[in-house]
Image (tube, rainbow, N blue to C red):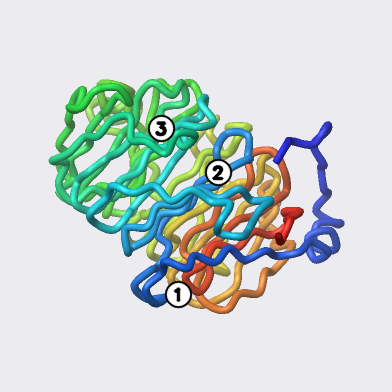
Amino acid sequence: MAPPPRRLVVSKERFSQYFSSLRTQTYLDPLQRGLAFHGLRAIAWNPLGTLIATGSADRTLRVWNPERPNVKHSTDLKGHNAGIEKVAFNPVKEAELCSVSSDGVVKFWDVRTKTATNTVTGLGEAFTLAWCPDGESVIVGNKADNLFVLSPTQSTPISSHQQSIQTNQIAFCWSKKRIFVTTGEGKTRILSYPDFKPTMHYPYKPHSEFVLNGHTSSCLSVELQPTSRFLATGGSDSIIALWDTTDWICQRTLIDMVGPVRSMSFSYDGSYIVGGSDEGSGLEIAHTETGDYVHSVKTAGPCPVVAWHPLRNILAYTDAGSLKIVGVEADRR
């Protein structure tokens, strides 16, 4: 799927009309062993938006061509022996994919040859994954709150960093010098990379770490806007908080979600944001700058994972155990 010659910018006033006109395509996997067992847990676009990977509870790891929804045009990557928790493409290499399974195995793949180029094992109950923006390393976290720095070319971790509190999802800043770490206390830590040290402290408490305190219960997800103006955090309190990255003040909160915010995604230009939850149904797309909700996507059930296309106003999400994409021009043959 080649990127368009120019990017289409859609105003807040026109967005609902525009998005309503787009077709929704479903991608069915015949290998699924019942929707509850199959359960898509992760989706990820490659940097150009020409491929999208899905990871499932039944160990299925598949790479789709969005324009060819028939499963015969997809790639089934075999090698994991436990459910897939996270998938993510290298941000600077369109064909390098990283996958994490719940048995602590991390695999790096060349999706063109369908081969695993590197495997790291023994990471415990791994469930989080974040690529450094330069594509040279990844952070994988486990349920024992240990964070591992891995290289795509080394079979053992570069380093490990045990955390003293429950640690959930992680995101990098685009400079690769800082990471945003969500915690079970409802806070988000801002740490340096690769040494994992607090980067800021309260001026009236020089030895007290500065954190973003925006949720009344566990903070589960975090996403940096492509323009870097806002950082979004999502919690089990059903709230998405948008933080101004200049002064780290919470500018607004989005409160119309049902259930814990399991994932979030900004559109390619950062104009819109959507959150995913494993409760309720439907997706609410909000305008980032104002916090106004601009469009609702009807779904069959909960949609815990969402991901905007990296270059276009195309939205991928999980619904009823399958991958769905709004806005793709698909060849159904």
Q: Earlier in the sequence, mark 2 or mark 1?
A: 2
Residue holding disc 1:
279
Which mark lies nearer to you, 3 or 2?
Answer: 2
Kind of residue at badge 2: Trp
Secondary structure beneath disc 1? loop
* Label 1 to label 3: alpha-carbon separation: 28 Å
Q: Find residue 77 and report its horizontal and vertical position in percent.
A: 39, 47
Q: Residue at x 20, y 27 (%)?
A: 155
Secondary structure beneath disc 2? strand
Kind of residue at badge 3: Trp
> Which quadrant of the figure contains the C terminus?
bottom right
Q: Find residue 37 and report its horizontal and vertical position in percent.
A: 34, 72
Mark 1, Cα crowd under 10 Å, few <14 / some 14-19 / many 20+, is: some
Q: Residue at x 60, y 56 (%)?
A: 316
Going by the image, does 261 lie left or right of 125?
A: right
> Which quadrant of the figure contains the N terminus?
top right
Kind of residue at badge 1: Glu
Which mark lies nearer to you, 1 or 3?
Answer: 3
Secondary structure beneath disc 3? strand
Is 181 rendered above or below residue 308? above
Q: How many marks?
A: 3
* Label 3 to label 2: alpha-carbon separation: 13 Å
Going by the image, does 123 lie left or right of 24?
A: left
Going by the image, does 209 lie left or right of 330?
A: left
Q: Find residue 139 and report its horizontal and vertical position in percent.
A: 31, 34
Residue holding disc 3:
131
Name the residue nearer the viewer: 235 or 84. Answer: 84
Residue holding disc 2:
45
Name the residue nearer the viewer: 277 or 287. Answer: 277
Quadrant location of residue 270? top right
Name the residue nearer the viewer: 121 or 317. Answer: 121
